[in-house]
Amino acid sequence: MWLYVAALVGLYYLVRWYRERQVVSHFRDKYIFIAGWDSGFGNLVARQLDRHGLRVLAVCLMEKGAEQLRTQMSDRLETVILDVTKTESITAATQWVKERVGDRRLWGLVNNAGIIAPVTYCEWQKTEDSVNTLKVNLIGLIQMTVSMLPLVRRAWGRIVNVSTILGKIASTAGIYCCSKYGVEAFSDILRYELRHFGVKISIIEPGYFKTGMTDMEKSLGKVKQAWEEDCVHIKESYGQQFFDA
């Protein structure tokens, strides 16, 4: 019996060793499009892929950010100005990518663009903050993916959607959680729909990492501003002591 167990354990480690030795070849012929590179995970991913020799196509919201990125990375990097909340901007960026990749197609799409509204109770949220969060984190991600999908499908490529642990466990970041729950659902559905095309869909679910989005001083400032701008009846219902606590 123990001989069988030892054989199974040995087989497991042999298969694991073999899989970990598999590497992707011809990096310099592969294009990766990254939405949301300017800080945090997106910036780190762009740098790492560039170091490995891949051709990074990075989204920038402002030209200043594009210039900064170009000075920090190799000449393989190319940038495009894009606002993920605007359909016409996504359409233009997709055409730009088509012209760049040509017959080599788009090997990878990384959706990392995201914002977070003030982390307050849902009742304290401004409607425009909620709508903007959904536009960037969910609607923009969906439109970007659908627009780039033909290029990824032709390459039998992969799509990586950056979600968060708050896309699994609801917390006080109400509308942010809603947007990330949507990312999780969209990714699962897309994985099912594209399984016959050989396209891989991955979800990254970070925990609480030190990025610009989790800056405590900025977060507290936004919460305080939201409270000060709230309606009188909300302040009366919750009370200043509740807010301070």
Image (spheres, rainbow, N blue to C red):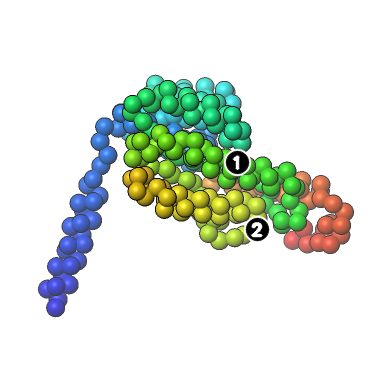
Is 240 located above or below residue 60 in the figure? below
Residue projecting furthest to the bottom: 1
Residue 45 picture location, percent across and down: 43, 38
Residue 50 picture location, percent across and down: 38, 31
Which residue appears at 63% of the width and 46% of the height? 134
| Three-letter code for the amino acid on which mark 2 is drawn | Thr
The tally of labels here is: 2
For mark 1, what is the residue?
136
Name the side, left or right, on which 84 lies relative to 230.
Answer: left
- Describe the element under mark 2 as helix, strand or loop: loop
Q: On residue 196, which mark appears?
A: none
- Describe the element under mark 1 as helix, strand or loop: helix
Which residue appears at 62% of the width and 59% of the height? 171
Q: Quadrant of the N terminus?
A: bottom left
Q: Quadrant of residue 98?
A: top left
Rounded to the nearest angstrom, the CA distance separating label 2 from label 1 is 19 Å
Name the side, left or right, on which 20 lies relative to 143.
Answer: left
Closer to the chain start, of discs 2 and 1, is: 1
Is 106 located above or below residue 170 in the figure? above
Q: Quadrant of residue 218?
A: top right
Name the side, left or right, on which 26 lies relative to 83.
Answer: left
Q: Observer-nearest residue: 112 or 196?
A: 196
| Three-letter code for the amino acid on which mark 1 is drawn | Val
Question: Marks 2 and 1: which is nearer the front?
Answer: 1
Q: Is residue 215 visible?
A: no
Which residue appears at 72% of the width and 57% of the height? 121
Q: Quadrant of the C terminus?
A: bottom right
Q: Observer-nearest residue: 27 or 193?
A: 193
Which residue appears at 85% of the width and 52% of the height? 231
For mark 2, what is the residue?
172
Residue 63 picture location, percent across and down: 57, 23
